[in-house]
Amino acid sequence: MTMRVIDIVLITEYMISIACSLYIIIAHASYFRERFAKGAVSLFMLAMLFFLCAYTVKMVTAVWMRVGNANELTAITIETYAWTIAQAGTTVGLVILAVLTYTKRFDLFVKLKIFDKKTEKGL
């Protein structure tokens, strides 16, 4: 029974990840067309494109394999739990990227507060 739940969770995460990665690729297509035409592309954006294309193919393959294995009862392993947790993190990351792409909020930064012992003591 636990394996079926894990299969459903993983397949759901995979489908959300596929949708987000495809959306991000399609949303940035005009950028890539423009930059390729000019002959200069941001290395970060090019790396993102390669990653997302490879990731999408990987996730489609994973769905295909997981659906094929979902019908068989197999023992759940630590690796399956680890994979599910890792996939959840990846899915959350892709959802965040998709939302930022949708809202076009690429200028968001995270400010890390650095604690300095001198500052804390008032020196």
Image (cartoon, rainbow, N blue to C red):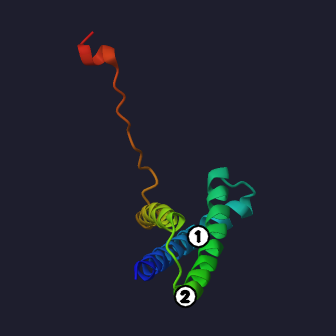
* Side of 41 where 89 appears, left or right: left
**Residue 8: image x %, image y %?**
44, 81
Q: Name the residue under label 1.
A: 25
Q: Earlier in the sequence, mark 2 or mark 1?
A: 1
Q: Toward which corner of the image does residue 63 lie, by quadrant?
A: bottom right
Looking at this view, is 108 or 121 the one in front? 121
Q: Nearer the viewer, mark 2 or mark 1?
A: 2
Q: Residue furthest right?
A: 39
What amino acid is labelled 2 in the image? Glu
Q: Which residue is drawn at 60% across and 77% down?
A: 62
Q: Quadrant of the C terminus?
A: top left
Q: Toward which corner of the image does residue 57 lie, by quadrant?
A: bottom right
Q: Which residue is drawn at 35% across and 20% down?
A: 116
Q: Residues within 10 Å of mark 2 (few under 14, many from 20)?
A: few
Real-space Cα separation, disc 2 to disc 1, in angstroms = 34 Å
* Side of 50 where 19 appears, left or right: left
Q: Which residue lies furthest to the left in this view?
A: 122
Q: Which residue is drawn at 65% across and 69% down?
A: 53
Looking at this view, is 29 or 82 the one in front? 82
**Residue 118: image x %, image y %?**
32, 13
Which element carries disc 1, helix, strand or loop?
A: helix
Q: Which mark is residue 72?
A: 2
Which element carries disc 2, helix, strand or loop?
A: loop
What amino acid is labelled 1 in the image? Ile
Q: Residue furthest top?
A: 123
**Residue 79: image x %, image y %?**
54, 64
Seen in the picture, residue 122 relative to 52 is either above or below; the reply is above
Q: Residue 66 carries which label?
A: none
**Residue 99: image x %, image y %?**
41, 65
Seen in the picture, residue 92 relative to 113 is either above or below; the reply is below
